[in-house]
Image (spheres, rainbow, N blue to C red):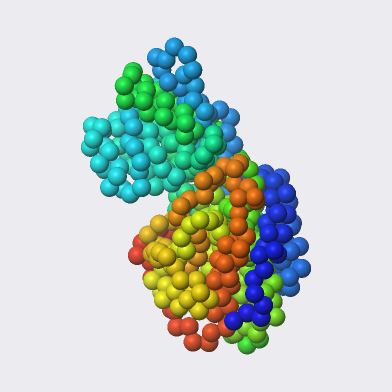
Amino acid sequence: MNSRPIRHENIRTDAAALCEIGNRFVGNPGEAEARDYIKQRFRDVGLAHVREETFEVATYRARTARCELIGVASGSALACVGLQFTGSGDVESEAVDLGVLREPSDLDRAIRRCGGLAGRIAILQCPYPYLFTERLVAEGAVAVVDVSEARDGHICHLNAMMYPALAANPNGTRLPIPGVTVERGDAERLVEHVRVSSRRVRVVHDARYEIVTTANVVGELASVDGTGERAVIGGHYDSQLEGVGASDNASGIASLIEVADVLASTRLHRNLVFAAFADEEGGFRGSTHYCRLHRDTLDSTVGMVNLDAPGWAPSQRSLHADASIRALAVETARQVNWSPDEEMDASLFPGSDHNPFIDAGVPSCFFWRHPPTHPYYHTGGDTLDLLDFRVVADTATVSCAMIERLGTDRNLGLGRSRPSKRWLDLRPDGQR
């Protein structure tokens, strides 16, 4: 395997520098500053052909977000933020509590229980509301209220739409109804109001979607054999709308830089591509852009390894992989004493930047720590002091072993990805 171990101190240094830059939401000044930092660090550790690959996306800019209880004498306003990629509107209507939603069957049961959603405001508790919002619209809901799961008064910044919708149409897709995300404590008042009082709620959301130019940052390590084949390792450098995104995903980008440093002198059979993706939080739009831009190299891309929020603890060791690469990922993980506690078919849930690669035909895997979800996921509470960088380094170690295997093993035989579900067809024409 690699010539020296992953050093958690190095990862912490780069993660701290990215957090010092501040918020990196797509289109914000910190995002551009982070690109410059990553380009310099890629060069520092010996990557060649370091470059930006630019593209345009619509970014979310909130003007107003309100949620009010109707018929309450005082204190009717609830703490909330806008639910990203919902429409603008001012809606007052009867509301219905759908409860905790994790699977499509949960929503089926909730709709039967409440007698339908037509003309009503739908209240749900889910960290991934984009899995359900289009169905809510189809069922006639006039607004969406999601309940934040974050602690201590923080409110999660979440999307009503995600991959593949935003990747398929990066400049124009949004839900036609308004939506907000309500702070967890105030949500208790909301649910009680809906169940025992007038049941009417007002939701106000006003947002604009500004077109901005962003970019992936890419660098390479060249093979000694000149085979023309390659493997990709990457993670996203953007954050959500609030805070520094220490876990999600400064720690992943810092791990990416450390992996590049460790492998810089390795004799490679295939080229290794290191990619810091833009705008993962807006629907994996950076990784989708990479797959489109490099469509002519996808046939010769043997695999992809994703680095996203690698080290929240306490949590399980989790492997997400498509069927074509799963056995190799498990075998490689065990070689570095990283046996997964859970294994999931990554193609069934669009969770991060590995999904566009799977849809493009590239075998892909994602080592991380989950569950539970970080308690301050997508909030200003995701700070450096909450991370154990030995745990981050543990995940970086298995990711490094995997990308080294993809770069050096002459007899991989992986073929093309085998998704159980293809969300967006990004394959080269010759693969279809």
25, 426: nearer the viewer: 25
What residue is shown at x 60% (from left), y 54% (from top)?
387
Q: Is residue 203 in sight in this rendering?
A: yes
Image position of 221 with respect to 377: above or below: below
Quarter of the image for residue 237 reads bottom right
Closest to the observer: 283 or 428?
283
Q: Position of residue 62 (x, y in %)?
A: 57, 33
Quadrant holding the C terminus: bottom left
Residue drawn at (52%, 39%) of the image: 151
Q: Is residue 357 above or below residue 136?
A: below
Q: Name which residue lies at 58% across and 78% down.
A: 404
- List x then y, in percent, for residue 247: 59, 53
Residue 378 position in % (x across, y down)? 55, 45
Residue at 41 percent of width and 43 percent of height: 126
In the displayed structure, 344 sits above or below 73; it is: below
> Can I make out residue 277 in this image?
no
The picture quadrant where one finds residue 269 is bottom right
Q: Is residue 192 above or below residue 213?
A: above
Instruction: Name the foreground residue: 85 vs 268.
Output: 268
Q: How many marks?
A: 0
Where, quadrant-wise, is the N terminus in this rendering? bottom right
Q: Give the image location of residue 337, x and y in percent.
A: 51, 74
Tell me if 388 is positioned left or right of 89 in this view.
right
